[in-house]
Amino acid sequence: MKTEPQAHKPESPPEGPANVLVINAGSSSLKFTLFSMEGEAIRAKGIVERIGLDAPRLLYKRFDGKALKRKAEVRNHSDALRVVCDCLVDPDVGVLKTLDWVEAIGHRVVHGGEKFHEAVQIDPEVKQTIQSLAELAPLHNPPNLGGIEACERVFGDIPNVAVFDTAFHQSMLPSSYLYAIPYEYYEKYGVRKYGFHGTSHKYVAQSTAEFLEKPLARLKLITCHLGNGCSITAIERGRVLDTSMGMTPLSGLVMGTRCGDIDPAVILYLVRQGLSADDIDRMLNKKSGLLGVAGIGTSDMRDIIAAAEEGSEQAKRALHMFVHKLVSYIGAYETILEGADAVVFTGGIGENSAYIRSRVVSKLGCLGCFLDEDANEAALDCAAVISTPKSILKAVVMPTNEELMIARETVRVLTGVEEDDEKDGDS
């Protein structure tokens, strides 16, 4: 069963901003997507790379495929945003007559802590809270805030909305999010599981419900976001019961360069061997995972699969570890959910690697999930059921779209629509 990607849409979307600009500001980059919310069409998208570094550049693509790549003289996010705005209103490549046509801006913010359970319109208090949470996400929250302040300077009074990676996971119970260490460390320092990739998991859960033509309030889903960063989430009736990433994005599955779950005593042992905290941090986040195990100089799953097929034992080992950890979590979450309706694959690997999906689903027979090999091979960057009709547990491929989710959340906040309580359809 294969079809074009289907996305969860409200039956009667409220009137709201017609053009929404989505911003994802990194430490040295600014990604942008401009949506026309009538039809949820992308009008333009791109990235300004290497902000504040040597040879910064702009990559820009319009809805009709017209694209450009050029140097950009930028020192900060405000400079980068002005370059983007110049493109958006450019007579030759632009899509807007004036910047006034942008009616709202949605921002990806990585960490909302316990403060934010949903997207919010940004005001001085919200910005202060985002700044205060920087110690939990030092590489992400400061540039996220920089993107917000750049938009305030360039666009003036246009409303800005923050959409948090952690918000969707805030429905977890303490039994899921607390660590078994003295409770005072949670109270004093906020040490707990927060989870990440929440915007993707939320979008995929909604879209899978739409695709399967079932209310999300009646579904139990295991969503697997597999890319360079990987996470898996157990979702019951639209709410998160558990997720694999923790206080930081380091824990859980084997990832491109991150180790995933590890005995914390390993870190203490390495400290006693003379490694510094910074050395260990770089090793666990930048040099581990598929990159560290496969030993071929890349974390790209396609290259690792190719190396394994050519006989590399280390590459084979990396693939076995990746699949083993993922299957272990699927089994655990099947139990937590007391039976799931579907396991869903998304992200760059989940959407595009029939090889990995085959390796994973082949181990789920005990859960009543059996692979349809033809459907799996045909499912490339599209929504599809890749399990056989007799499967009790469905296997689904569902492309994610975090930018569109941010745009939708921006409209929802500004139109005053409350989050769906996901009540049972019989009530």
Image: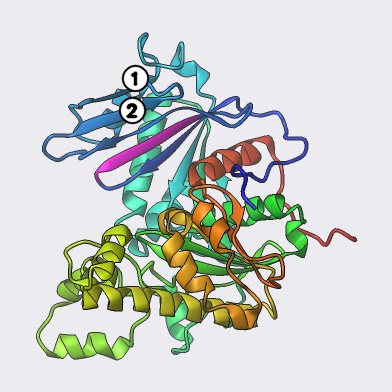
Q: Are marks 1 and 2 in contact (CB under 8 Å)?
A: yes
Q: Nearer the viewer, residue 33 or 317?
A: 317
Write down the quadrant of residue 170 in the picture. Answer: bottom right
* Mark whose residue sits in front, 1 or 2: 2
Q: Nearer the viewer, residue 366 or 205?
A: 366
The magenta region covers 28-34
Q: Residue furthest right?
A: 427
Q: Is residue 148 above or below residue 345?
A: above
The percent coordinates of residue 239 (x first, y second) are: 66, 65
**How packed is label 2: few (under 14 Cα within 10 Å), some, or many (20 or more)?**
many
Q: Is residue 169 left or right of residue 90?
A: right
Q: Which residue is mark 1?
A: 87
Q: Amino acid at mark 2?
A: Tyr
Q: Amino acid at mark 1?
A: Cys
What element does badge 2 sit on? strand
**Residue 60: numbered disc:** 2
